[in-house]
Image (cartoon, helix red, strand yellow):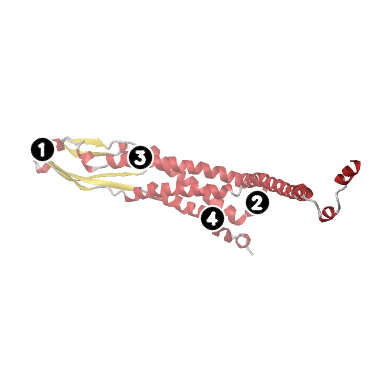
Amino acid sequence: MDPVSQLASAGSFRVLKEPLAFLRALELLFAIFAFATCGGYSGGLRLSVDCVNKTESNLSIDIAFAYPFRLHQVTFEVPTCEGKERQKLALIGDSSSSAEFFVTVAVFAFLYSLAATVVYIFFQNKYRENNRGPLIDFIVTVVFSFLWLVGSSAWAKGLSDVKVATDPKEVLLLMSACKQPSNKCMAVHSPVMSSLNTSVVFGFLNFILWAGNIWFVFKETGWHSSGQRYLSDPMEKHSSSYNQGGYNQDSYGSSSGYSQPASLGPSSDEFGQQPTGPTSFTNQI
């Protein structure tokens, strides 16, 4: 049997049915969707400038942009409608920092989720050894939850800036020819942002998955078991002391509480005997 077959036979794929490993597998898939929809994006828009002098017009001005969205480096030339002179322009804005941070978090989250899933399946015993594996897993999960929240929020703001900067109406305002009423400027088609919108959605879904998985990772640590022991020990001591106090109270009631009323009334034997006190008193008289 080759080493790959031995490793596959030694693995316990039933772990994937448990919430911890199942959520890790979902995190792996959602991380792929997040960085693929953002990092693989390329789009563009097309504008047209119709000058009074038709020979100076340009009815197909293509402006292409892509990840990492350094829009200030995207240049294009447009007619000025003043002879053959052309105007060189560039888009406004730079959303590369938020986009690259988002993709970086997604890539590292994918790598960690893949490694953690492999450990859950094939090295479960070593993972639980000395409680070191669950503690590291818990800390990394908390960190990635925070990074997903920050990265998704930053990229949502960056995407909003990209949409404004690539809006055809905003780009037309940059052209000097479009400021003259005699010239006709219009947008042929706008950029499609559906995949970028999807990347933001997957970013926040990843945050929900990682934040929800914190509890299941915490249950694997020694902190959870020690906390349960800390809560159970005082309850056991309280219940044992209560039981001891209850038994002592019953014995006290049976020995003292009920014996005292019985001694107040005369018994049948004592009632049958003649009192000696009054007889001796009459004899003395």
Kind of element beneath mark 1:
loop
Task: State yes or no: discs 1 and 2 in contact (Cβ < 8 Å).
Answer: no
Q: CA distance from mark 3 to mark 1?
A: 35 Å
The residue indicated by pointer 4 is 19
Circle 2 sits on which residue? Answer: 126
Q: Choose the circle earlier in sequence order: 2 or 4.
A: 4
The residue lying at 20 percent from left, 37 percent from top is 173
Residue type indicated by callout 1: Pro
| Amino acid at pointer 4 | Pro
Front-most of 39 and 221? 221
Is the Cβ of the residue at disc 3 closer than 8 Å to that at disc 4? Answer: no
Please identify, in this view, whether the residue under mark 2 or under mark 4 is nearer the observer: 4
Q: Which residue is mark 3?
A: 157
* Residue type, label 2: Lys
The residue singled out by tag 1 in the image is 181
Q: Where 83 falls versus 205 (above or below)? A: above
- Residue 242 is situated, as x and y percent measured from the top left of the image, at 69, 47
- Mark 4 / mark 1, whichever is N-terminal: 4
Q: Secondary structure at mark 2?
A: helix
Q: Which amino acid is tagged 3?
A: Lys
How far apart marks 2 and 4 lie (CA) works out to 19 Å
**Quadrant in the picture for the N terminus:** bottom right
Dot 3 crowding, Cα within 10 Å, few <14, some 14–19, many 20+: some
Tell me which label, 3 or 1, sits earlier in the chain.
3
Residue 99 appears in the figure: no
Considering the numbered disc 3 on the image, is that residue within a helix, a strand or a loop? helix
Mark nearest the camera among 1 and 2 is: 2
Q: Nearer the viewer, mark 3 or mark 4?
A: 4
